[in-house]
Amino acid sequence: MNPEQQKRLARIRTKIAQLDKKERVLLKMIQYAAVGGLACSIVGFQFLQPTWVFKLFFLFGLGFFTSVLLYVYYFRTFSATKPPGGFLLICSEFILPKNYYTNVALPVVVDMRGEYFDALSQNRIWKARWVRIRGTYSFFAAIGLDRAFAFVSFFIKAWKSVN
Amino acid sequence: MFNNDPRLPSPKELIILDMLAGKKEMYGLEMVQASSGNLARGTIYVTLMRMDDKGYVTSRQLMEENVSGLPKRVFSITGLGQRSLAAARSAHAVFGGGEVMA
């Protein structure tokens, strides 16, 4: 690994560490808000409906629902996912000949992952998603084209041998 | 224009050979980005594999660690590839009326 790649890897590791710290603090805050809001809304609906305190507790209840929404959004944003192309590689390793797998399928996935991690390291989530879609399409295009080319060459050879 | 002659590389192969002649080693995505839309991500490795079979290029895996965790395959031009590129350039200069490659 050259010095530039080492620097880049260190920068990515630091970013991941910062994300973990932020993740823990945010998780705790949301958990306390959710539990507190739930308790207040239950007490308010059970005992304090005709009074002004009810309104206050109802607001806490709304806070609880907001917390749940934040919680869901948080997990959708920071959840860990597998790198793209893993399933494609497993399938292609099983289905394709080793030569095609090494020379066509694997490099397409390597390129897709390289672009994907570049986009993620720049915090460009939507670009990373687009790279995943485009890479999957490229993978199928490469495999399809390869098989089509093999079929055509087989057909030409068969035609020549007959004539 | 070169497809009629089976001994000469196809236009896509010529673009790849031209890029590889200028640099020492390149990988597929690098070629796609450098080709400004002439090469596609889905077809580049099929073309390169065909060129490898013909003997125009040779490839090796970079075993060093990278971000994706998988080894990259880099390609370089062979002597046959350089001769084919030179032949295609001179053929086009004689019969095509100009330079096809920079």
Image: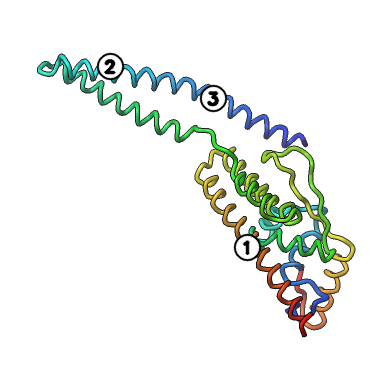
Q: Residue at x 74, y 37 (%)?
A: B65
Q: In the rendered structure, which disc, 3 or 2, sits on the residue that comes first in sequence?
A: 3
Figure check: A43 above or below A127: above
What type is the residue that disc 3 sits on?
Answer: Asp
Horizontally, residue A40 falls left or right of residue A70, namely: left
What type is the residue that disc 1 sits on?
Answer: Gly
Colour pattern: rainbow
The crowd level at tag 3 (other Cα within 10 Å; few <14, some 14-19, many 20+) is: few
Figure check: A83 above or below A53: below
| Res. A39 mark | 2
Pick the quarter of the image with the C terminus of chain B. bottom right
Alpha-carbon distance for marks 2 and 1?
A: 58 Å
Give the secondary structure at mark 2. Answer: helix
Instruction: State the residue in front, A83 or B14.
Output: A83
Q: Residue at x 53, y 47 (%)?
A: A127
Q: In the rendered structure, which disc, 3 or 1, sits on the residue that comes first in sequence?
A: 3
